[in-house]
Amino acid sequence: MITARGLVQTFETRQGRTRTSVTAVDGVDLDVAEGEIVGFLGPNGAGKTTTLRILTTLLKPTAGTATVAGYDVATQPVQVRRSIGYCSQVGSTFSGAYAGDEVVDHGMLYGMSRKDATREGQRLFEQLQLDGLWRRMPKNMSGGQKRRLDIVMGLIHRPSLIFLDEPTTGLDPQARANLWGHIQRLRGEQGATVFLTTHYLDEADALADRIVIIDKGRIVASDTADNLKAQVAGDLVTLEVATDDQVATARDKLGSISADLEVQGRSVSGRVGRAGRAVPGLLRELEASGVTLESIEVARPTLDDVFLSLTGRTLRDAEAAAEAAPEPEGVPA
């Protein structure tokens, strides 16, 4: 459904009389199969949003090629747009129109009859917990309700390929869980392909068949969540000892099975391969050495650990940095 080769996007920005060329996407290769749910991870400054804009024909690439639903994004943008659904980060509804009218008009732009668009829109309203809001204007809706309305707009014409750009931002936990179920039904019942960008790692872990991570404009990983987490060197074992004088012994004993140690106060932590096998022996050695533990925790690798190992920063830190330095905006070079 999506094939990209060597995508490059540069922007020309200006500060006073100084012009600077910034490369936001730097040679991206990407493949998404029919019926696949792909989670696209990375901070805004990494090129995630720019790549999405190229694939949805909102931006022409500086170099490289991409086909979406069988059509070239540069030379056949109209055909691409007819084949996809798109829910952007910023939303697309007009605040002064009735929600139902917006949805029906959007469906009719895709060739649906008013009757079919109304029936499908009301079905989606019910599934996405927008019951009773058909005749309400978006300006009178909560942030979460407007976000769900944006999603209805992207799904009204039953597209076979759906781009969802951080769709659950602003949703409460119940609404998030409801949307997760709906995304899974889109694939299960309609055979839809879903390209999902998100900064919620649990969301990517739960929904995506495959995770693609982009950093500094390049794809740095593409695999299942389980396989990516397996690449992280071991489980994180954290020991908290009872007294300060026991820290050195705990560090030495844990250091015998872990080469990557961190000590904070009375807490000693390190990555341990096959921790389930190693920890019982570690506990016996600590007890024999007179070390009293207040607690011990063993944590399996997470997607945030994967991101840290690949980029040198956690996704949470990267998102915070992106707030201060978002993806460049300017004139495409």
Image (spheres, rainbow, N blue to C red):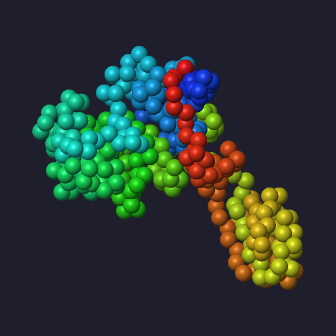
Report if residue 280 is visible in the image.
no
Q: Is residue 131 visible?
A: yes
Position of residue 198 in the picture relative to residue 69 (left or right):
right
Q: Position of residue 98 (x, y in %)?
A: 18, 46
Q: Is residue 71 left or right of residue 7?
A: left
The residue at the point 59 percent across, 41 percent down is: 325
Instruction: Please tell me how many numbered marks the rendered image carries.
Output: 0
Closer-to-camera residue (263/325)? 325
The residue lying at 58 percent from left, 45 percent from top is 324
For the C terminus, give its image quadrant: top right
Residue at x-position 26% and y-position 50%: 139
Place residue 26 in its image quadrant. top right
Left or right of 264: which side holds 213?
left
Residue 118 drawn at (x, y percent): 15, 42
Q: Position of residue 304 (x, y in %)?
A: 61, 53
* Residue at 42 percent of width and 52 percent of height: 169
* Apparent side of residue 332 relative to residue 78 in the rendered image (left or right): right
| Residue 174 screen position, x and y as percent | 37, 62
Residue 70: quadrant of the picture = top left
The quarter of the image holding the N terminus is top left
Q: Is residue 129 above or below residue 41?
A: below
**Above or below, 155 relative to 291:** above
Q: Residue furthest front?
A: 16
The single residue placed furthest to the left in the displayed view is 115
